[in-house]
Amino acid sequence: MVLKVPVPPAMVHGDVAEGYGPVADAFRRNFEQGREIGAACAVYRDGRKVVDLWGGYRDGRTYEPWQRDTIVPVFSTSKGVASMAVAVLHARGLLDYDERVATYWPEFAAAGKADVTVRQLLSHQAGLPVIDQPLDLPDLFGSAVLAAALAEQRPAWTPGERHGYHGQTLGWYESELVSRVDPQGRHLGRFFAEEVAAPLDLGFHIGLPENTDRRRIARIHGFRTWEMMLHITAMPPAFAWAFANPRSLTARAFQNPRVLGIPENINRPDVQAAEIPAVNGIGQVRSIARLYGDAAAGGAGLGLTASTLDALKSPAQTPTYGCADQVLRLPTQYSLGYIKPFPAFRFGSASGTAFGTMGLGGSFGFADPDTGIGFAYAMNRLGFRLWDDPREVALREALFVRVLGEMPQRPDTARARARTVR
């Protein structure tokens, strides 16, 4: 969707700490260039909020403004937020990343999964990006139907040999695992609300509460699947072609329940209320930044231990047959529920200790422990890149290059061209 009128400069709000003006300049420029309908960006450094910006329209049809307390669906940026619940359990000594999943969840051992470790599952190496049993929205509330479908699923490849983006399934596997490890048996949505969001006073939800004021929710303005083919220079061609084939692993990874196959369905109240930890997190952008900011500054607010933080900061463990992503159809790197920096997607400082997740359409949140940065950006006008949306990367470049003096956030031209698996 393109706005009929530009966003007036007076509709860009917020403030930044001294020295962070380049981030505000880049944020305003996105609106001036007509790239945004509505958006927000926030940054924490060493536990202190240094950037808090928002602007435009939360609904581009009705021209209702994006307010300070607007909440927005962030698609797969939810994955990193949800995975912090697993990190909390690890920090409490209730879960070992290198233990077999079946140790905590015996039924998971079915269909050749007995030796899959928690690390492999969280790192998209378990071969479980697809659920063959058809699901409906009512099944997505920690039901026995969902648990059985997850446990009975046969891997698409030998676990540990390859990896492929578990676009929807990762959060459900995490949720069932959390319920088996948590002494109270809570699934991820409730565990996150009580053990992650509450301690940090986050305005973020995995499964939107019924009493939420819907006037606070930003409307997502998305696209249809066929439109991806019109943006082949932005969307990696191999991924776009695979997604257009309904029988491919790529398409099947994003189509169960079928309602999730259309991006704008994220606006539906029943989809927002469901528990889809990998996809339907909704909240304030500054809450995402605060969560990552806590982790980047040592994790005191969540009680993260040094060993948990070391695990999150460590390089990804490469599958046996390399980094070719069987779902996204290009090289990627994953670790413990997060994206790690790799040549085509450089984020954070040069050390590579950063970790986070990007979301459909351009949103992104991550922690960079070396600089103490927690960064988050989200918008309601969906773009077509898998990562490095021009709006988001402009903000990240302003922060890390112009403010912090760190490495460029854009890959060089040669690396940018390396977008397909050879």
Image (cartoon, rainbow, N blue to C red):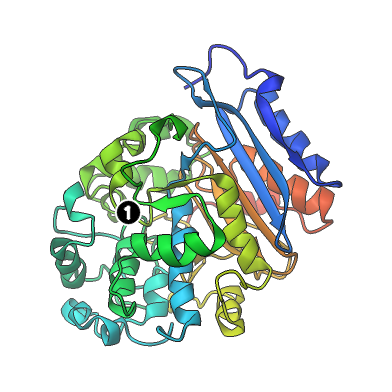
379 is higher (above) or lower (below) than 84: above
Q: Amino acid at mark 1?
A: Ile
Q: Position of residue 232 (x, y in %)?
A: 48, 36
343 left or right, relative to 333: right
Looking at this rendering, what residue extends furthest in the top direction?
A: 4
The foreground one among 145 and 250 is 145
Instruction: Characterize the local packing of mark 1: few (<14), some (14-19) or many (20 or more) Cα atoms within 10 angstroms.
Output: many
Q: Residue at 56% of width from left, 53% of height from top?
A: 288
Q: Residue at 55% of width from left, 38% of height from top?
A: 69
Q: Residue at 26% of width from left, 40% of height from top?
A: 270
Q: Position of residue 101 (x, y in %)?
A: 31, 81
**In the rendered image, which residue does mark 1 sit on?**
276
Res 78 → quadrant: bottom left
151 is higher (above) or lower (below) than 415: below
Q: Residue at 30% of width from left, 45% of height from top?
A: 273
153 left or right, relative to 197: left
The foreground one among 208 and 79 is 208
The foreground one among 58 and 314 is 58
